Image: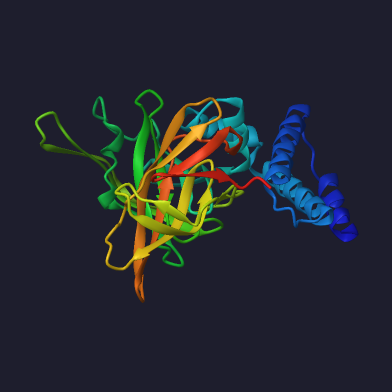
Amino acid sequence: MRSEFNEYKQELQHLQYSSEQKKQLATTSLYRAEFERKHAPKRHSKHRMTVSIVAAILVLIITAGAVGSWKSVAELFAPYFGTSKKQTEVMGVMGTALDESVTQNGVTLTANGVIGDKYNACMLYTLSWDKETSVELPDNLPADAWDTSNTELLFKDETPKFWNATIVQVSKEKRQIKFLLRLSSEQPVIQKEFTLHVRDIQLCWPDETGETQTHLVAKGNWELTTKTDYSDLSCKLKGDKTFELLDGHKATLNEAYLSPLGAYFVWTVPEASDYSHAFDITITKTDGTTVSMQYVGGTTAYQKKTARYISVFRSDTILPLDDMKRVTVGKTTYTLSRD
């Protein structure tokens, strides 16, 4: 503990921040510490908790020195995931601001930032071009116009994944397109290096008659490698080991995690049953409102007389765990583990 704390102090001596940055870092660190206090199992000792908090603060400070304060992460994602004080604080903990880019033929692809949990990640990218580069953009582009057939998301360890790209902003004046790439997997995606590979940037969408329209933005070959480096705020669900599917059948819940961004479930049913997606997830918030999570994919494996399913969900907004009152899985209600 003494050597770890000394290393921590040595790192601080080499860092300088404005009063505003110090305030932002303190807010983020306190939020993380408060989260650890509320959600950590009771078996964690005071010594381990102190080490955990010091380590978390050190990581946050070093990260802030490299890529900016937590506020920059919230500013990046707030327009798409929520602007409340709690939401921005959560995004500051579970996200990292980035500034990595690659340019070809006058067109630059930039990775702006990433937020995520253990099984879900969301990356914000900007496509921009200089004044000398001729790029014509159609009017009223739909959000799903990004042509994913020319885009690959490559993990070094070949992590299975379910992903999509959504255009969130088009600015002809600023000469840029912003898009969100949302990734989910039944295997952990946190702390993984991946490459976004785009060949001949192209848009594709159906018009009002149903005919497919395509538009070539720029020819080239862009490869940008980055890392899903952030803090996982996932929390286990507690309750009955069985839950009722939407059709009334019973399933066994083997493992379940919930985070502000998504959910991960491992569950089994008799092999004779065939359910790829047989339940919904609804979050009831402390203010009485409800939010549904979207099923995005999963896998099935048959073991002896049972079928084992992995189901991955994600939310279109950030849902702070402290704002969650209960979770309804199929027809069964669970509470968060807040020991």
Q: Is residue 157 above or below residue 332?
A: below
- Say which of 77 and 106 sits in front: 77
**Count of numbered marks:** 0
**At which x and y percent is residue 164?**
34, 46
Q: Is residue 208 left or right of residue 272?
A: left
| Residue 28, quarter of the rendered image | top right
- Say which of 316 and 70 sits in front: 316
Q: Residue furthest top?
A: 173
**At which x and y percent is residue 125?**
44, 41
**At which x and y percent is residue 50?**
81, 51
Q: Is residue 127 left or right of residue 67?
A: left
Residue at 84%, 58% (x, y): give it: 4
Residue at 38%, 41% (x, y): give it: 107
**At which x and y percent is residue 270?**
33, 66
Whether residue 224 is visible to the viewer of this picture, yes or no, is no
Q: Is residue 156 left or right of residue 7?
A: left
Identify the coloring: rainbow
Which of the image's four quarters has the N terminus? bottom right
Q: Is residue 222 above or below residue 305?
A: above
- Say which of 239 and 128 sits in front: 239
Q: Is residue 111 left or right of residue 5?
A: left
Whether residue 298 is visible to the viewer of this picture, yes or no, is yes
Q: Is residue 50 above or below residue 321?
A: below
